[in-house]
Image: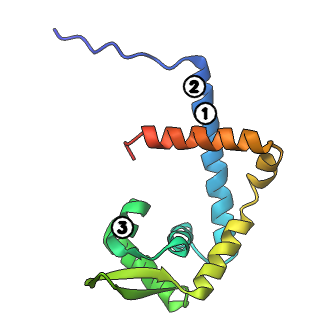
Amino acid sequence: MATAPNIRRPDVLTLEVIELIGDVVARFHEDYEAAAGEHALTGAQARLLSLLSLEPLPMRKLAQKLKCEPSNVTGIMDRLEARGLVERRPDPSDRRVKLAAATQEGRRVARELREGLRFAREPLAALSEEERLVLRDLLRRMVNENSWN
């Protein structure tokens, strides 16, 4: 009879860190949903708009970043486009590909969304610049070392 591989259980500190990360994520999502609601947006619409405020992206890439099906992105885009927040345009490097892009109004709303996220502003401001840099670098390392995303 085969035995299960020897799996190392996380130590107490690791479990506490995991719990704290979960708390941060939950609070971020609550705050993000509230900020989106202030602009009559769903969380998915706000996330898509925030991504497009950084750079135009092909629809397929948007679906990958949002971890959803391209058909879902199409529906979200349709609703945002009807409000004048995004537009579809041909990709200058490949006219067969449609790029999704935030309009000027969409970029303004995305900026207000970012500025409206209150939950982490004060706790982060209480950290020194050096502490924020360390936190940023540790989070980047965690994200980059976990290619399971």
Badge 1 density bin: few <14, some 14–19, many ≥20, Cα 10 Å: few
> Could you say which quadrant of the image residue 99 lies in?
bottom left
Secondary-structure class at tag 2: helix
Q: Where's residue 137, x and y in %?
A: 60, 41
- What type is the residue that disc 3 sits on? Lys
Q: Distance between the residues labelled 1 and 3?
A: 31 Å
The answer to whether the residues at label 1 and label 3 have Cβ atoms under 8 Å apart is: no
Secondary-structure class at tag 3: helix
Give the residue furthest to the top.
1
Q: Mark 3 points at which residue?
A: 61
Against 54, residue 77 (above or below) is below
Against 148, residue 70 (above or below) is below
Q: Which numbered mark, 1 or 3, is in the foreground of this view?
A: 3
> Which numbered marker is on residue 15?
2
The answer to whether the residues at label 1 and label 2 have Cβ atoms under 8 Å apart is: yes
At a point 55% along the width and 75% down the height, the residue shown is 53
> Which numbered marker is on residue 19?
1
- What type is the residue that disc 2 sits on? Leu
- What type is the residue that disc 1 sits on? Glu
Q: Distance between the residues labelled 1 and 2?
A: 6 Å
| Mark sitting earlier along the chain (3/2) | 2
Q: Where's residue 138, x and y in %?
A: 59, 37
Q: Which numbered mark, 3 or 2, is in the foreground of this view?
A: 3
The answer to whether the residues at label 3 and label 2 have Cβ atoms under 8 Å apart is: no
> In the image, is 126 to the left or to the right of 22?
right
Q: Where's residue 19, x and y in %?
A: 61, 33
